[in-house]
Amino acid sequence: MNRKCKKFEKHLSACVDGELSPPMQEAVEKHLASCAHCAEKVKGWTALSERSAEALNAVADSSSPPHGMPTRVMAEARARRAQLRTVRAFRRLAVSAAAALLAVVVGGGVLFAQMRHEERILRKLVVSQRDDLSQAQKQLEEAQERHEKSISALHFRMGELLERVEGFSPRTVFLPTESSNL
Ligand SMILES: [Zn+2]
């Protein structure tokens, strides 16, 4: 008997009846695995509980009360067993309802996580497309700049050529009067 035993003492009987919440049941079972004192107690109670359940069933199942048993006791045994069955049915129902609720919550969580994931992917896609677009725009601007440069180089070259051609133009050579009008 130690400090931990004191902490779990009040839960041992509920543990035997299977009435603890799953986390508490787990905690108690963990303690039982390492504590012979409490494990022995639970073992004794479990055996007792099984024996009394068997006795209850035997009485409730018999068509006539065992010798010397008042009918009232028999009726009580049957009522008690019916009550236990109802309690167990309700417990099972509660467990399956909790499981269903958990499934809905987990399912919703998974769906939500998936939505968030898809949203992130879409956002990334938009960002990458925006990047692509701005890169394409930049390339276009650079191409335009190169184009303008080559056009102005071409103009310059054309000007040079024209000057050279005009320098040797038959008009400047042979028609000096007209070239002064240009
Ligand atoms: Zn203990």
Image: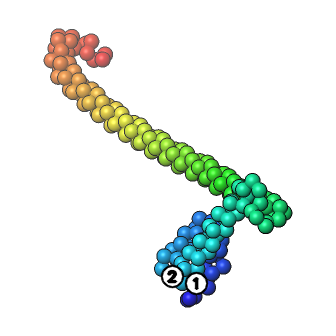
Q: Quadrant of the N terminus?
A: bottom right
Placement of 115 over or under 167, stated as above or below: below
State if disc 2 and disc 1 touch (CB < 8 Å).
Answer: yes
CA–CA distance between discs 1 and 2? 8 Å
Q: What residue is pinned by disc 2?
A: 35
Query: For mark 1, does the 10 Å Cα neighbourhood hold few (<14), some (14 to 19), or many (20 or more) residues?
Result: some
Q: By what rule are the colours in the image chosen? A: rainbow
* Horizontal and vertical percent position of residue 81: 73, 59
Q: Amino acid at mark 2?
A: Cys
| Residue 80 in sight | no
Q: Residue at x 58, y 84 (%)?
A: 5
Q: Ligand 1 within 8 A of label 1's CB?
A: yes
Q: Residue furthest bottom?
A: 2
Q: What residue is pinned by disc 1?
A: 5
Q: Ligand 1 within 8 A of label 2's CB?
A: yes
Q: Residue at x 72, y 61 (%)?
A: 59
Count of marks, rendered view: 2
Placement of 2 over or under 166, stated as above or below: below
Q: Amino acid at mark 1?
A: Cys
